[in-house]
Image (cartoon, helix red, strand yellow):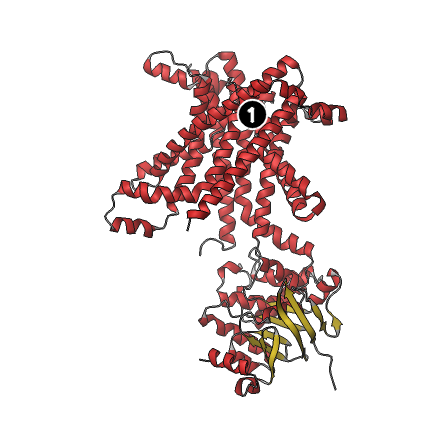
Amino acid sequence: MSDALIDALNPALFWEYRLVLLRGLAFNAYVFFAAAAVALLIGLAAALLRVNRARPFRWVGTLHVEVFRNAPDYIMIVWVHFVLPLLLGKLIGQRVEFSPFVSAVIALGFVYSGYFAETFRAGIQSIPQGHLDAARACGMGETTILVRIILPQVVRRMLPEAVNQFVSLFKATTIVSLIAVPDLMYQVSMVTQQEMRPLPLYTWAALTYFVVIYLVAGSLRRLSEHWRQKIYA
Amino acid sequence: MSNWERLVWNQRGLLWQGLTVTVEICLLAFALAIVGGLVLCLVRLHVRPLRPVAVALIEFFRATPIFVQLMWVNYVWPELFGWPNSFFTSGWVALGLQSSGYLAETFRAGIEAVPRGHREAGYSVGMSSFQVYRRIVLPETLLTVAPSIVNQFTVIVKSSTLVSVITVPDLMLQAMKLVNVWYEPIEVLTATAIIYIALVFLVSSAGKALADFHRRRFGLDSA
Amino acid sequence: MDAVPAIRVVDLRKSFGALEVLRGVSFDVPPGSVVSMIGASGSGKSTLLRCINRLETPSAGEVYIDGEPMGGRLSDISRMRRDLGMVFQQFNLWPHMTVIGNVIEAPIRVRGMRRKEALALAEECLARVHLSEKGKEYPARLSGGQMQRVAIARALAMQPKAMLFDEPTSSLDPELTDEVLTVMRELASDGTTMIVVTHEMAFAREASDRVLFLHNGQIEEEGLPDQVFGAPRSERCRQFLSKKLQ
């Protein structure tokens, strides 16, 4: 076993291909940022629907959240990549194709919009009614209240939970290799097919992801705590 | 005969087989997650010399993406340890280890949240540390963390779709097989997605109902 | 004829880091007597009580329970704790067990009693605190006063040599303190050995055999209730009482 262990921990092969592999990691980042943007926007919209006074809006919001929070990432990516273009194609009478990158962003964006919607909703509902009453009493309009009173407080309250969701989303980007987005795992499998040495490659892929995520998640959490302590009463 | 009938309803036997494999893998992974999480947590809290090892394992299992862990357990472990010797085993071991990292932290938060006074009440009637742990700390912890445990089970169910990549014949793999044979993905994949969503929804609803029932029974709902 | 004191404290000292909380406290508690401890917050009363059943470890000094020194191995401490019942300010009932479950837990687990015996004993104890009908309830459904009385029953179920009360009514709404004080007075008149840390001056004056006034970790004044309350020798005690009884 110790020979295998030495082989597994040998960074030489990983290092040799580092440029290719790093470009793969960059793709994880691209997918992450794009999907995060989608997830935040749609999640916010869904959250606002969920707390709306009108019942049909609330119902739509709840449906959105329940469907996407309970959907596995992998099946959604596959569905968006293979089924959605066909459905759209039938709709507009023309052949539609999604690039793997677009499919990944749409799928992950929508799935994680479900989680963010819940995070936002909890944040919105945790704001004391008194703050809103005071704003209305001053004659503030609903949009102004949303932007100046609700959103800033929601952001502050839900930042730790949101950081967790972001970390999860980044981890989820590793499966985009399965629809041929050239991320780190995709490159690793390509190199493995060529070099036939899975031990060091997969071990170092795991270690790389671990280090990146551990460090980034840790600093994000510390930064957000620091920022929250400064302003949050 | 519509596509739905041809591709989904007539293949329901295959899909059902896949579903049973999915459920099996999820239950095994869940068992490992709970046992592993508890062991890691207790070692971290009470076995001082092994604490850094426990913390390192917890952080590693949590920070590494599930797909990466799956590949690693499946391709690297057999060379390192001579085990697992089947894809099915790699599947539930990887899923279980990842969740054990999360549950270890969940248990720790729950244990630390048990009020000190409850422990002291136990000590003051002459209970030993072990008795206090077994009869007071752990049961109260379970009450508090039950929702998180249920949540982790839904995470396992969702992540289980990835074991199809290492050719475990779960629901996802059966669906993909059908798609590759018939080249008609719409009905099969939509049906599969709906089944998974329904399954996860069922598990989380059941868990929530169970948790609510217990909270009401102990009178812990906001009275 | 000098009976062995139920509890004897000799020159007890306790520091938390640089903070000296107990600076040499000594007193005896004869069996069957009620000793009340009064004093300002931070005077060390609770710490003193918790040193007696070793929830806090003294920095120096000795505690004797029925002649035996409290301390040593954990198993010895656990054994001696069986003979001391403690009632906490925060009640500390175990939320996942019923009232009766709370009361029979220690007799079964610690004294090895059989379940039937323990249940009978629990019924008695609950009757003593006037809560016989609440056996099957869970603590979260009880009022504060009821919870504290269950806590008393739980401590009584171990049939201790002495009962320690750590500000038992301080967490209760005013209208709920009476039911607890009534039970405590009944225990006192039944001959239970009790040490009571309290802010309830009326109880201290009327139900105790001795009163100790603590200030800054030392006993400033001690004696019969009428003497401590009526004609205190210490100036600080006088000030404390005049503020308290305003």
**In the displayed structure, does residue B141 sit left or right of residue A81?**
right
Where in the figure is residue A172, as x and y percent of width and height? 51, 28
Q: Quadrant of residue A106?
A: top left
Residue beneath the point at 56% across and 52% down: B113
B59 vs C172, left or right, is right
Front in this rendered view, residue A27 or C97:
A27
In the depicted view, which residue is nearer to us: A111 or A18? A18
User: Which percent across, then down, holds residue B133?
Assistant: 65, 53
Question: Residue C223 appears at what percent x and percent y?
Answer: 61, 84
Chain letter for mark 1, please: B
- Determine if residue B30 is in view: no
Image quadrant occupied by the C terminus of chain C: bottom left
**Outermost residue toward the front?**
C18
Is residue C66 visible to the viewer in this orientation of the structure? yes
Q: Quadrant of residue B169?
A: top right
Q: Quadrant of residue C183?
A: bottom right
- The reply, left or right, for residue A64 in relation to residue C235 is left
How far from the left and from the top, in percent, is residue C119?
A: 63, 64
User: Up-down: is A151 above or below B8?
Assistant: below
Residue at image coords 46%, 18%? A100
For mark 1, what is the residue?
B162
Q: Which one is nearer the viewer's eye here, B28 or A169? A: A169
**What amino acid does circle 1 point to?**
Leu
Residue that appears at 65% across and 37% down: B57
